[in-house]
Amino acid sequence: MPTDPGRPPDVSTYEALVEAHYQRVLRLCRLMLRDPHEAEEVTQEAFLELHRHHGNGVVGDWGSWLTRVAVNRVRDRHRAGWWPRWRWRTRSLDSTPLAARAPLPDQVAIGDQTLRRIRTAFDRLPRRQREVLTLRQIEGLSTLETATLLGISENTVKQHLFRAIEALRRALRHGERDPADPVST
């Protein structure tokens, strides 16, 4: 039966919820964890929780609920302490595949170099600034939603967002380069 293009997709079934939210939750976890394997595991844990709670009918907004579960699972991984040191030594963010359209040939050199600078600057941000930047700018949550999700005040969200954006701007403006970048040597 064809669906009306003006109607939102049916997310009443578990399968429909997975289809509607899986890629977004996975992207969120990759940005917050900076490790594709850990992100995949956390995403699977979030959807396992969805499977456990789906029949209860208690949750009104499954998208927000999944975001909260994923952020909490990411925080659990950060609290564990040992895994970031081990993972950061074994695989860099530059080797993480990102979904993007191929740039035009005349933009490749500049684009790769700029992307490396942004990634390096993003990696240098404190954890809380990365969380706020990811939730506000990439996931598009409001200041209030971000504050509620992270358990901090709206003013704190604004401060962390301002500092994160300024750090990224400085990195681009001053041309901070990745030492592994062969173009910068």
Image (spheres, helix red, strand yellow):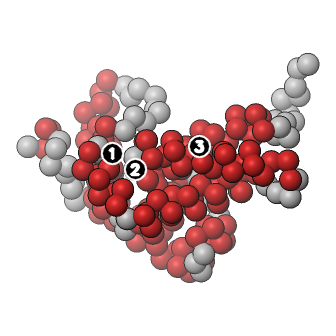
Which amino acid does the dot numbered 1 rest on? Leu
Give the residue displayed 29% in from the left and 58% down from the top. 85
Q: Nearer the viewer, mark 3 or mark 2?
A: 3
Give the residue displayed 48% in from the left and 76% down from the top. 159
- Which mark is first along the chain, 3 or 1? 3
- Which mark is first along the chain, 2 or 3? 2
Q: Where the C terminus falls, by quadrant?
A: top left
- Residue nearest the viewer, comparing 12 with 79: 79
Horizontal and vertical percent position of residue 113: 25, 41
Which amino acid does the dot numbered 2 rest on? Arg
Horizontal and vertical percent position of residue 88: 29, 52
For the residues marked 1 and 3, what is the alpha-carbon distance in whole angstroms?
21 Å
Q: Residues within 10 Å of mark 2 (few under 14, many from 20)?
A: many
Q: Can residue 45 be seen in this view?
A: yes
**In this rendering, is residue 163 above or below 89?**
below
Q: Which of marks 1 and 3 is in front?
A: 3
The residue lying furthest to the top in this view is 1
Which of the 4 image quarters holds residue 73? bottom right
**The label number, if any, that marks residue 34 in the structure image:** 2
**Disc 2 vs disc 1: Cβ atoms closer than 8 Å?**
yes
- Which mark is first along the chain, 1 or 2? 2
- Residue nearest the viewer, comparing 182 with 28: 28
Decide if residue 36 is on the left or right side of residue 85.
Answer: right
Which amino acid does the dot numbered 3 rest on? Gln
Write down the residue under mark 3.
Answer: 44
Q: Can residue 114 be seen in this view?
A: no
Give the residue displayed 51% in from the left and 44% down from the top. 41
Write down the residue under mark 1.
Answer: 93
Decide if residue 79 is on the left or right side of residue 113.
Answer: right
